[in-house]
Amino acid sequence: MTFTTANSNTFDATATLARELVEHVRAYGPVAVAFSGGVDSAVVAKAAVEALGEKAVAVTAVSHSLAASEMQIACSEATSIGIRHIQVETNEFERPEYRANAGNRCFFCKDTLYRTTASKLSDLGVSGMVNGANTDDLGDYRPGMLAAQEHHVRSPLIELGINKSQVRQLARFWNLSVAEKPASPCLSSRIAYGVEVTEERVRRVELAEAFLRELTGLYELRVRHEADELARIEVPLESVSLLAAEELRQAVSTRLKALGFRRVTLDLDGFRSGSLNDMLPIVRLGGVAE
């Protein structure tokens, strides 16, 4: 009985939170949702279409940093949610600041997306932009949030104090297919700071990760592109021994070198989201503090 009551209480609390989110987004008026197809932006998109119907639109940035598999997920999820969905080509790779890949690379990516979307608001029939940032993002290094501030992009999840755990509860409540989807940042986030971001390098990472997923059946993994064309593979700790086994080790080394990596390493500390941020000194929003 306790278990049932607990589940009922959780459901009721999530249902209340869902209504609050929908009403909060309704108050914005017609909006464009920056939509990656991940759980955060999917929850905001669902709330937007519930609140605004055809007056809401999901906008996905198309560039070399978006894996083809992630675009497929975004398109499928937008269709499932029932929100109008457009893709806009962004040109962040043409920006020297982005390619330089300093600690604030993400600012220039989001700045490009928001600028491009802002120029299309009238054509889209909307008056503002929202994103899927949640309160857990406030405790991490997120220079892209400065771009959101500069372009007056609202963050309804943050405004309502919603964290990642609650986002997933909302996704389950709405039966979203991405409710349990692990985070999948853009391909450029795999390139070590200080190493130039190029179309060739992000494509190399995309193909390497796709190969590893097919070979191992693992989804949550990263191929970090370090300096001197070195690949540093991160998989969950319990799977390190799997890749270290001779047959797989040789296959991985051969394939990744064929893709253009000069050396291939396996990180014995396992998968850690955002591990490249370890390279940064003390950081502040929008830049790097020495």
Image (spheres, rainbow, N blue to C red):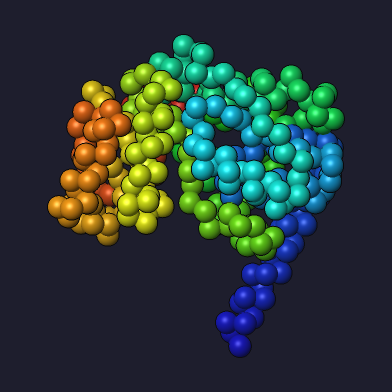
Quarter-of-image position of residue 100: top left
Q: Residue furthest left?
A: 246
Q: Is residue 166 left or right of residue 231?
A: right
- Residue beneath the point at 53% across and 19% down: 92
Q: Residue at x 38, y 37 (%)?
A: 207
Quarter of the figure with the C terminus = top left
Residue 52 position within the rendered picture, expressed as x and y whole percent measured from the top left: 84, 44
Q: Nearer the viewer, residue 243 or 247?
A: 247
Residue at 58% in and 26% down:
110
The tally of labels here is 0
Q: From the viewer's perspective, is residue 141 above or below residue 166?
A: above
Image coordinates for residue 162, horizontal then vertical, percent: 62, 50
Q: From the top left corner, tell me how far across and down residue 3 is, in percent.
A: 57, 82
The residue lying at 76 percent from left, 45 percent from top is 83
Q: Is residue 58 visible?
A: yes
Q: Residue 48, percent across and down?
A: 76, 45
Residue reaching furthest top? 96
Q: Nearer the viewer, residue 112 or 215?
A: 215
The N terminus: image quadrant: bottom right
